[in-house]
Amino acid sequence: MFARINPEQFQHSFLLWVQAIQRVRSDVIAIDGKTHRGSHDRTNGKAALHLVSAWATENRLVLGQVAVHEKSNEITAIPLLLELLDLHGSTVTIDALGCQTAIAEQVVRQGGNYVLALKGNHPQMLRDVTALFADARAALPAEYGLTSARSVDGAHGRLETRQAFVIRDPQAIGYLNEGKRWAGLQSVALIEAERTLNGTTSTEQRYYLLNQVLDAATVNELVRGHWGIENQVHWVLDVTFHEDASRIRTGDAPQNMGVLRHIALNLLRQEPSKGSLKTKRFRAALNDDYLSKVLGL
C-alpha cells in the first residue's frame, strides 16, 4: 500500500497537518538532509533515498521534507522545500552545501532571514572572510566593529567552549559583497569551537553569512540550535525508529515511510507526558488509551 501512495499528495497532507497542530510560528528553521541507508536496491540500480527536512528548532517539529532525485543533490531539493514553508519572520539555517546565492535570494524573497555556513564551495568568499576576521582580531582595538561572545558547556567527560565573533561594519560587508551577489548580506560570523574529550582537545573554525545584524551571543545560539536537527531528528530516527536498518525499498514506499516516521516523531514530541521517545512508543504499543492520546483522538 505504501509503495502505491502518491508521495507528493502524502507530503501535502503532512504539511496541512503540521500547520494545523503548530500553534507558534517557527522563529528558527534548520534545513538538513539524511540518507536512508537501507533503502537502496543495487540489483535494480536504485540508490538509497535521501530526504531533505525542515526542523522548527523551538517547536521541535518536522515541518516538511523533500526527496532528492537520484541524479541530483540537496542544492536542487532545498529550494523546493523552502517553497512549501512560510518563512516570514523566520531565520533559516543551512549547512555549507546549501550556501548558494540563489538559495539566499529565495529565503529573502519569501520574507525570511538566513544563516548560511560558508566553506570551500565558495573559495574566494571563504578566503576574503577568513582574512577579514584575521585582520579584525589582530588589530588593537579590534577593527570593523568586531563583537564576540563566549559559551561553555559539557557533560560525560566532554567540555566545549564556543567563541562567536561577528563583523557587521557596512564598509567591510560591502567589500565582501561586491556586485550584491548575496541578497541582503549584512554581517559575517566566525564560530571558534574548542572541544576536549577524554583529555584530547580539538579546535575548529566555522564561518557564516547572515542577512541581518545580530549580536554574537545570538549567532552562537542560532548556530548551535541548527544541530538540533541532527541530534533530535536524524539521530532519533536511527536509534529509536531504526530508520537506517529498514529495508523497505519498493516503489515510493521508502519516501512515504520517511514521512510517516516524521508524523510519528511529531506526535510523540507533542505528547506532554514524561519519558523518552522510546518509552512513549512502547507505551503506545501496549496501551490503546495512551495511543489515542498520542494520536489526539
Image: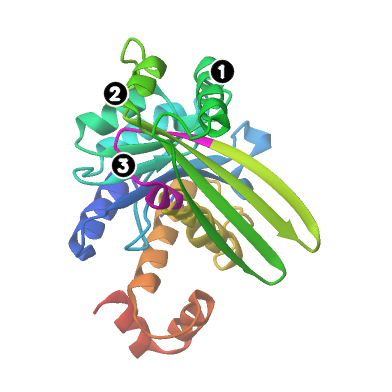
* Magenta-highlighted residues: 207-220
Q: Is residue 54 in view from this perspective?
A: no
Earlier residue among tags 1 and 2: 1
State the SS at label 2.
loop
Q: Quadrant of residue 297?
A: bottom left
In the picture, the disc for residue 123 is: 1
Judge by depth and name the residue closer to the eye, 29 or 238. 29
For badge 2, the amino acid type reads Ala
* Marks 1 and 3, the one that precedes in the sequence: 3
Lateral position of residue 244 relative to residue 197, left or right: left
Quick one: quadrant of the N terminus?
bottom left
| Residue 218 located within the stretch drawn in magenta | yes
Name the residue nearer the viewer: 46 or 55.
55
Q: CA distance from mark 2 to mark 3?
A: 30 Å
Residue to which mark 3 is pinned: 8
**Residue at coordinates 56% horizontally, 18% vertically from top-left?**
123
Residue position marked by numbered label 2 in the rendering:
183
Residue 265 picture location, percent across and down: 42, 65
Say whether marks 1 and 3 touch (CB < 8 Å): no
Q: Along the horizontal axis of the image, is 17 left or right of 262?
A: left
Query: Which secondary structure, mark 3?
Result: helix
